[in-house]
Amino acid sequence: MKIDWVALGSVFGVSLVATVALVGLFTLGIIGLTKGEAATRSGGSAVMARTGAYACFALCAVAVAYGIFLIVD
């Protein structure tokens, strides 16, 4: 049995980058919701913060759906 270390390293690198990007995107969504709540409490408008947060969550859902598609297909 021979292991292709270059391919294994490539898969590890892509997985690491995708994981960090997805977690970062979800974190931005949570931060956006928090900023929206703070803006609402202080009497301001939270439309941009909530819109950005929902966009981040939507991109997370698309990335997860694409990953499931790749696994199933």
Image: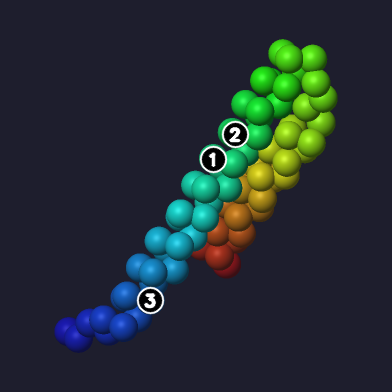
Label 2 close to label 3 by CB (< 8 Å): no
**Label 2: how many Cα within 10 Å (few below 14, some 14–19, many 20+):** some
In the rendered structure, which amino acid carries the disc numbered 2? Ile
Residue 43 at x, y percent in the picture: 79, 15
Badge 3 or badge 1: first in the primary sequence: 3
Q: Residue at x 49, y 60 (%)?
A: 18
In three-dimensional space, the C-alpha distance between marks 2 and 3, rounded to whole angstroms, equals: 31 Å
Q: Which residue is mark 3?
A: 10
In three-dimensional space, the C-alpha distance between marks 2 and 1, rounded to whole angstroms, equals: 6 Å
Q: Residue at x 68, y 21 (%)?
A: 37
In the rendered structure, which amino acid carries the disc numbered 3? Ser
Query: On the picture, is 5 further left or further right than 15?
Result: left
Residue 45 at x, y percent in the picture: 82, 25
Work out whether 8 lies above or below 40. below
Q: Which residue is mark 2?
A: 31
Badge 2 or badge 3: first in the primary sequence: 3
Label 3 close to label 1 by CB (< 8 Å): no
Q: Which residue is mark 1?
A: 27
Q: Residue at x 49, y 47 (%)?
A: 23
Label 2 close to label 1 by CB (< 8 Å): yes
